[in-house]
Amino acid sequence: MICVTVMIAAFTSAASGQEPAMSLIPQPAHIRAQEGVFALTADTVIVTTGNTRDIGQYLAELLEPATGFKLDVTESAPHNRQGGYILLADTSGKHYLGCEGYDIKVMKNCIFINAPTTTGVFYACQTLRQLLPPEIEGNRKVENVSWTIPQLEIEDKPRFQWRGSLLDCCRHFMTVDFVKRYIDLLAYHKMNRLHWHLTEDQGWRIEIRKYPKLTEIGAWRLGGVGYLPAPDDPAQANAARYGGYYTQDDIREIVRYAESRCVMVVPEIEMPGHCQAALAAYPQLSCTGGPFKVRTARGISKDVYCAGKEQTFEFLENVLSEVIELFPSPYIHIGGDECPKDRWKQCPDCQARIKAENLEDEHQLQSYFIKRIEKFLLGKGRRLIGWDEILEGGLAPSATVQSWRGVEGAVSAAKSGHDAIVSPTSHCYFDYPHSDREKNSLSMPNWMRVLPVEKVYSFEPVPEGLTAQQKRHILGGEGNIWTEFAPQQEVESRVYPRMTALAEVLWSPQNKRNWQDFAERLNVHYQRFDNMGVNYYRDKVQ
Ligand code: TNX
């Protein structure tokens, strides 16, 4: 009987023509393959040391559904256990692996995982997961699979510290469970930042106790249930009420969950533009006084926070104070992008501010706005991130710039000694179509250029023309999913497999990048996705 099982397993893996066991994404920095395998059985024990108990438990839970094994998690090395053991250790002696690196040694009867931090141990577990057959990802017991891991040694650490994804929960609201799954998939790819876009023209999604109308009014719009219509499209008039928001308890739950997956949640509270939903709730924060509706159409609203009135700053500081309480992230993203200056030009309060502060124009007024908010954040011990528009009119002293209109923003930031996150539309906008076919079938507008996975894979986050010192300011990159064209049920198929490619770009050594090799590993990765039920995009007519 045992013989038959082994033969079936061997046949299955040969038939797929792949070596799934070595198909790792992102590719580790160093692998040394060896002969033989470690066989995971119901008798295998997970041994934890130091602070690794929670991760040991997590690993046991991960392995249980497909194998049916309820592995013991203990703190002492077992004697004569038939099934061998997996030892998780966070050891301070491995400084050279950095704060996220790890090493794995797989031998016949045991697996040693070592890392200087629990984060490293967590990433080792993600690698271990991918060293098992793809069936490990199923949520039901699978028979006739031999759960083996090839004997090998891996030493691994990331190329970049900032491996992020923006998730826009404003253009479309997403449930807490969905956001958790999104985090799980990021963590699976060793991505470590969730840039959570929480406020927009089309919806305010975070409960602020001091300003209840933000969510009573600002979280709901009339229409825009599916793809957001163009501004001149009258189709949505009298449409149904649509929206939702996260309570402060929801937010705490998500932040805690993300922490357990080594993901830092960086909230984005947009200002001075992209705030029509807030103005619908509190029109006195605008230049004209309103009234406003939560925006239904896509595109950019001309109505923005008034930069002249003191109450705008009082409001934003109160909002940010609650945000800071909820998010332990050292960074707060304040947007800063696409802020039309039309209203400021006509507004007596804004013009008075320009005069009083000796500013040249409305661009400098925006810069005044951002610098003032930065000062507030720094006083609370937090650092500001803003889109590359915050460079216009003078950059706030310690701001980090997120470059989206190409990489020029990152170049100027790094040249002036500021940190930068790189996410150009050309390579990192996962709301754009995967292919012409998709673009046409979904009737996406022309400015959404086609972005195939191969192009994402060719992304180089460090722009040319920087000195070694300046290059150190490039923290990493982000793959962004804006959701004008992606309600929750379409988010995964926009994001994957492009995020998979970006994960390798941001984690693996640059000299290991090889599209052909990646494409082969991606085929095995698809089998893992199939088992996880990930709704990834695959162009069947390639
Ligand atoms: C630009 S990227 C925006 C978003 C849109 C996105 C659509 C950025 C800072 N602003 O508001 O959703 O394009 O691709």
Image (spheres, rainbow, N blue to C red):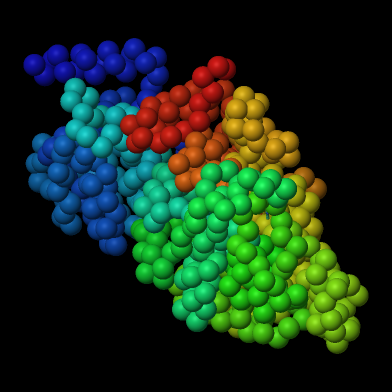
In the image shown, does 126 or 98 lie closer to the viewer?
126
Q: Total of numbered circles in the picture?
A: 0
* Residue farthest to the right, as pictured: 360
Q: Nearer the viewer, residue 431 or 325?
A: 431
Q: In which quarter of the image is the C terminus?
A: top right
User: Residue 500: percent from the left, percent from the top?
Assistant: 51, 37
**Residue 471 at x, y percent in the picture:** 70, 53
4 left or right, relative to 350: left
* Place of residue 58 in the rendered image (x, y in percent of width and height, measured from the top left): 27, 51
Eyeballing the image, is 32 above or below 234? above
Along the viewing direction, whichever of 427 and 43 lies nearer the viewer: 427
User: Which residue is at the front of the view, 522 or 234?
Assistant: 234
User: Taking the image as drawn, is residue 120 in sight?
Assistant: no
Quarter of the image where the N terminus is located? top left
Seen in the image, is 429 located left or right of residue 50?
right
Q: Where is residue 113 in the image (x, y as percent from the top left)?
A: 32, 47
Taking the spot 45% from the left edge, 53% from the top edge, the residue there is 174
Q: Using residue 246 as the reference point, say whether residue 38 is left or right of it.
A: left
Vertical comparison of 179 with 321: above or below: above
**Residue drawn at (67%, 71%) of the image:** 291
Is residue 56 visible from the viewing direction of this image?
A: yes
- What residue is at 37 percent from the left and 69 percent from the top? 249
Instruction: Answer above or below: position of 115 versus 459.
Output: below
Q: Image point 41% across, 68% down: which residue?
A: 247
